Image: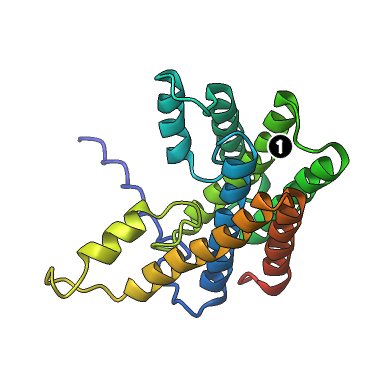
Amino acid sequence: MSAAAPPSPPPPSDPIGATTEDGDPLALALFGLTAVSGLIDAVSYLGLDHVFAANMTGNVVVIGFALAGAPGFSVLGSLTSLAAFLLGAALAGRLTTGRLRPALAAETLLHLAAAAVVFARGTHGALLQYGLIALLALAMGLRNATVRSLGVPDLTTTVLTMTLTGLAADTRLSGRPSPRQRRRLLATLTMTAGTVPGAVLVLHHHLPWALVLAAALTGATLLLYREAA
């Protein structure tokens, strides 16, 4: 008699955010974090050696620019950001276990730590800048991996490429309109809404206050958001 076939594994469960509506607390929290991402990238790119702390695609491109000899770009700075981001993403499973509030708490503390360093020491010196980049990118990696595990469509909080692709592709003109068009537009607008004040503060020599603002927005999201039991 042949041995019985082993039972097939259960189908994977849907991500917690697969059916999240735009007005749900989780979606609102992610919109707020998208604004923080714009703010942090404004700080890191304009104030910390043209490096992205949230948008890792940008760092890959920047490394290519630097290797080609383009002035004003740092291979080491972008590699520092990539390494810290990946470390944060790797730690997310252990530290946040797929829940947003622990990630928000860690991100708030890391933003505050970066702000404290700038208030105390400024941003002059390569080692100091790399340390600040590492703090910010670590925060973004922790958050990005946590948000990814929640699986809310079109709300990654750090990149907009696929969001914008969907915004353009899923229209009546294409014959396949999507109910998530408003979400995609709001995600784009909220990232811009964070980038503008971040850029203004950095350009007017108030970089540490931009980090305080990022910590305040992330902390407010932590206080207002309540996860389902």
Q: Can residue 35 be seen in this view?
A: yes
Determine whether, in the image, residue 171 is placed left or right of residue 206: left
Can you say whether 112 is above or below 16 in the image? above
Position of residue 39 measured from the top left corner of the image (x, y, whole percent): 60, 55
Determine whether, in the image, residue 160 is placed left or right of residue 51: left
Determine whether, in the image, residue 49 is placed left or right of residue 117: left
User: 157 or 46, which is in the foreground?
Assistant: 46
Residue beneath disc 1: 132
Q: Residue at x 57, y 22 (%)?
A: 76
Position of residue 105 measured from the top left corner of the image (x, y, whole percent): 73, 56
Can you say whether 85 is above or below 112 in the image? above
Amino acid type at circle 1 is Leu
Outermost residue on the right side: it is: 120
Quadrant in the picture for residue 4: top left
Q: Residue at x 78, y 48 (%)?
A: 115
Q: Which residue is drawn at 70% across and 55% down?
A: 210
Quadrant of the image containing the N terminus: top left
Q: What element carries label 1?
A: helix
Outermost residue on the bottom side: it is: 23
